[in-house]
Image (spheres, rainbow, N blue to C red):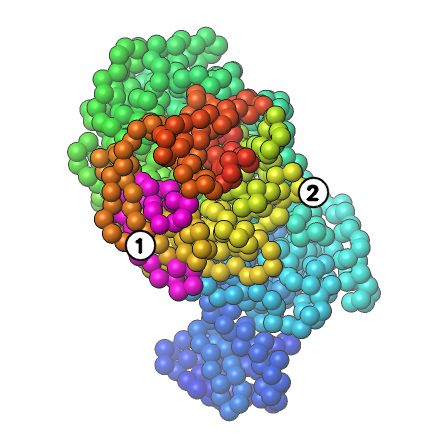
Amino acid sequence: MPLAPGHRLGPYEILGPLGAGGMGEVYRARDTRLGREVAVKVLPAAYSTDPDRLRRFEQEARAAAALNHPNILVIYDVGTHEGSPYVVSELLEGSVLRARLTGGALPPKKAVEIALDVARGLAAAHAKGITHRDLKPENLFVTRDGRVKILDFGLAKLTQPDREAGSQSKAPTRSTDTDPGMILGTAGYMAPEQIRGGPADARADIFALGAVLYEMLSGRRPFHKATPVETMNAILNEDPPEFPPSPRPIPPALERIVWHCLEKDPGARFQSARDVAFNLEALSGLSEPSSGIARPAPIRRRARPALLAAALLLLLVAAFALGRVLAPACNYEPEFAQVSFQPGAVFGARFAPDGETYVYSGSWGGGPMRLFSGRMGSPEKRELGIQGASLLSISSKGEMALSIAPQRIFGASTRGTLARAPLEGGAPREMLPNVLGADWSPDGSTMAVIHDVDGTSRLEYPIGRLRYESKAILTDLRISPDGQMVGFMFHPFRGDDRGTVMVLGRDGKARTLTREWSSEAGLAWSPSGREIWFTAGPGSQRVLYAVSLSGAMRVVGRAPGGLTIHDVARDGRVLLAADEHRADIYGIVPGDERERNLTWLDFSVPADISPDGKSVVFTEEGAAAGLLYQVFLRGMDGTPAIRLGEGEAIAFSPDGHQVLTEVYTSPPKLVLLPTGAGEPRALPNPGFDQIHINGQWMPDGESIVFGASEHGKPPRCFVQSIKTGAVRAITPEGIGNGVLSARGDTLYAGGPDRQPYAFPTNGGPPRRLTGKGLEPQDTYLRFGSDGRTVYLTQPDGQFAKLYRFDALTRRRTLVRELRPPDTSGLLGVRNVVVSRDGRTIAYMARRYLAKLYVATGLR
């Protein structure tokens, strides 16, 4: 029986009915304690005796209450009154989307705005391990102020709860609570896998979002038939019809987003709601959607390395069309003038004080970094005669800040010795070691710097005055035009270019302005000083954004491939690079004379060789991998790769049945991914801010050794039990990396005096070793199966050499020179992994191709 006005459910007084649905009745009510109006959803007592229905109702409450996002209905309370369970939520004013669709199609701009809100809400839910599974216009509420709220998580599928994960956690999906083959959802919006009764993950919500977006744009459902059975059959076997003619044509880029959401195969859809939101953001500010937006469809095929140069040429031609890409959103057309023509790696570019001269540093053909200057309107370039230096900044007085002998840490970010030199050239004067970034103050009298001191990034402005410090890596330092603020990029995990944009305000406090990106590089202030312009995105597919000091975001420009901003002139001209970053895996097995290409997607990073030498485990870190990356297993014979889960791969277990991975949540966590049947398992984190991806398994497979940093402390090495999770330190602070002996009783690492030491893993004092036969540039990989052989590598220019070192005789033997068959855009050979017998090898070839442009008209 419906509840009458005045009826009480605990502290909630019923005011009147709002509606009813399959999961219960909804009432307007007043919270007598707080004096506010709320919505109360009640499951009638007659149904509360149904265990399955009651379980689903409780599941809705748990799922929605775990979420806190502006695009998801806020849950205040849950309770039971006289056998009737109820949920209390915020009271919304407006109407469900279905009511708006009764009048037909929505304008494309409005449809994009609604879909973007939904995608953002879904991304928040999916990050908590929750899928909705019944997304439809009836469950989308548009408030009077235009905000969209996702309702009714009654069919949501909870994944395994993850008490250790932070806000970005994506817990592995467990078996659904429903019976095998049970179909939950609404015909017309269910994904094919839901109709078949199979497992449905976040990608099922993406399919439903595509169906809703199609309906908003066309005024009709994409798979609507006479009966539910016929509708479900159409979803399984038919493509949605083309959009009907309309006086407001749908932009091609928007059509591609819809088709990509509605792919039958979950693997062919967008892989996350965050990716959908990212693509919709570019369209959300359109004032005239009918003009058609030119944006390339996602490219799924992996380019062969030999075609990189040709692909880059096409990318750069497309970059010239960037103005036309942006034209529908504005009344101006940006222009692009190419100023570097030889493909290579550009690591720094700045405008000179006269506004007509620009200077950039880069490396071509594997040679040393060099400095060049040029003038607008002239193809001529002048080399400044300084080699082995990267440009950091140019002062208003015409003096350069340089990084001498820079070592790349990730992307185009480097660490080197800060020096200053005249703009016209001349010998640099060194100032400060281990500098990650520097920028001149507007008057050219002083500098702000970021330098690394014992694993801590220190931001000083002026030099010597500490303003901010962190165990994270800080890069891309820029001072505001008025000299009062400093913008920079914050990378929480060392060795990884994911991160956020931060600003050191006029009050001296550092604030985060953006969400976390999986890749960010390049930052500059707008001429007015009211915005920070930066380039970031998923993987290397970086887009040019602007963020205000209050955190308001907007897209400034995008191009196929990626962009990196370097500088903004006083008149608004922009120095930026159209670039491509990628990493290829090459493998060598016994009998091979040449390397075989084992690359899977666009940024494949090898982590370990399986104990039997037949497989390599690797991480995909590019545009297709998402914020937390993806771990894959692939046969050394080139068989297709198998996805194991999210995170960054570290090492195989001794039996090869598990892979140790790190997942970049906050705080981070170590996860064991099965290589076959089984469920992922997260290990407890006792309080580490950072976990370093140098973990190794003990030979018995019952413990792991890894480096980690406790809050505010330097890194050190720890042993953790797989069974109990107990952790203990085995090295002093400051020693966070080492190589485990074949028996697992000793960890070999460099001490504070830069000499090798042996640290017993079961406790006890370390002992100093003789360094005879070892060299400072050696990188130690692992001990061989005989217990006395150590495999190590040395850089050889842009290539590398693999050695076998006998720890008893102190003799080293060259195993192989590691040279990929294709050297186009090669930055270097990295991440070498080798089997215990030394016969199977894999390594990463890191590539970077960029050309520099001056853009006019970007706003």
Q: Which residue is mark 1?
A: 762
Q: Nearer the viewer, mark 1 or mark 2?
A: 1
Residue 765 % position (x, y) = 23, 48
What is the residue that sits farthest to the left in this orientation? 464
Drawn side of residue 442 relative to residue 21, left or right: left
Q: Quadrant of residue 405?
A: top left
Drawn side of residue 74 relative to residue 131, left or right: left
Mark pair 1, 2: CA separation: 70 Å
In this rendering, does residue 697 appear at all? yes
Mark with earlier residue (1, 2): 2
Secondary structure beneath disc 2? Answer: loop
- The residue drawn where x is 49% and y is 27% is 815
- The residue drawn where x is 44% and y is 34% is 791
- The residue drawn where x is 53% and y is 24% is 819
Residue 32 % position (x, y) = 39, 82
Q: Is residue 444 above or below residue 383?
A: below
Residue 552 % position (x, y) = 41, 46
Q: Is residue 739 above or below residue 28?
A: above
- Residues 665 and 271: in front is 665
Label 2 amino acid? Pro
In this rendering, does residue 551 appear at all? no
- Residues 739 and 746: in front is 746
What's the mark number on residue 371? none
Q: Which residue is mark 2?
A: 249
- Residues 845 and 287: in front is 845
What is the residue that sits farthest to the bottom in this orientation? 82
Q: Is residue 599 above or below residue 192?
A: above
Q: Which residues are magenta?
A: 721-749
User: Which secondary structure class fits the magenta region best?
Assistant: loop
- The residue drawn where x is 77% and y is 62% is 232
- Residues 419 and 738: in front is 738
Secondary structure beneath disc 1? Answer: loop
